[in-house]
Amino acid sequence: MAKLSTTRDRPAGDIARERIPPGQVVTLKFPVLHHGSVPSIDLASWDFQVFGLVQQPLRLTYDDILALPRERVVADIHCVTGWSKLDTEWEGVKFRELVQHIDVLPQARFVEVRAEAGFTTSLPLDVIDDDDVLLAYIYDGAPLTPEHGWPLRLVVPKKYFWKSAKWVRGLEFMARDRLGFWERNGYNNSADPWKEERYA
């Protein structure tokens, strides 16, 4: 069994209102929001690919992902539509763990996240390399449901939740940024909830 450790996004003693960005309302539910239909995925043919500005491209099967050290992140998440959910619990592979298996070239500054159905988003390398960024396959102690991104989704708690792409299939390391699906359709590329960077 892969090792399991815990990371808290903020100290447990924080007052809840100090954890809620401007314009957000706390929900106890977990709303399901996405464009288009939930993809049908066959794990027998599923893979995860890392390419671009790396010394050697990497291809992982789902079993390869599950064999990597598993960690837990407890974090608040914030949707651009105005809801926040506190103390969500995710388990999976930290980006920092994954990158230990990749020789990233020094000119890489951004990462494009590739997902099913051609969806993409991008993040600066120094943002995605944060300690609470996770490639998650478990939510709240159970496997992700298809509606929430099974078999694998990115979790980037410090950004609006569209940056936490569902149904992730790979990462491209890049020298220059490239706008993703939502960013090309009017969403702010920085996506900082504390600055209310919702739309371009």
Image: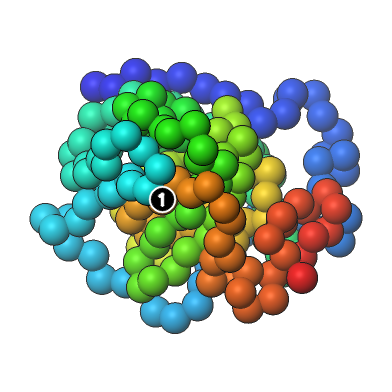
Residue 18 image point, x, y percent: 87, 39
Amino acid marked by disc 1: Glu
> Left or right: 126 with respect to 3?
right
Q: Nearer the viewer, residue 72 or 54?
A: 54
Give x and y (percent) for residue 74: 59, 34
- Label 1: which residue? 172
197 or 152: which is nearer to us? 197
Report the side of 124 relative to 112 (left or right).
right
Element at label 1? strand
Q: Residue at x 48, y 49 (%)?
A: 174
From this view, report whether residue 54 is shown above or below residue 188. above
Residue 55, x across and y down, in percent: 32, 34
- Please indicate whether residue 2 sits to the left or right of residue 11 in the image: left
Residue drawn at (21%, 36%), measured in percent from left and top? 64
Q: Along the line of sight, which residue is nearer the eye, 45 or 111?
A: 111
Q: Quadrant of the C terminus?
A: bottom right
Q: Examine the rendering and report whether any part of residue 88 can be seen.
A: no
Q: Looking at the rendering, which quadrant does residue 80 occupy?
A: bottom right
Note whether residue 161 is visible: yes
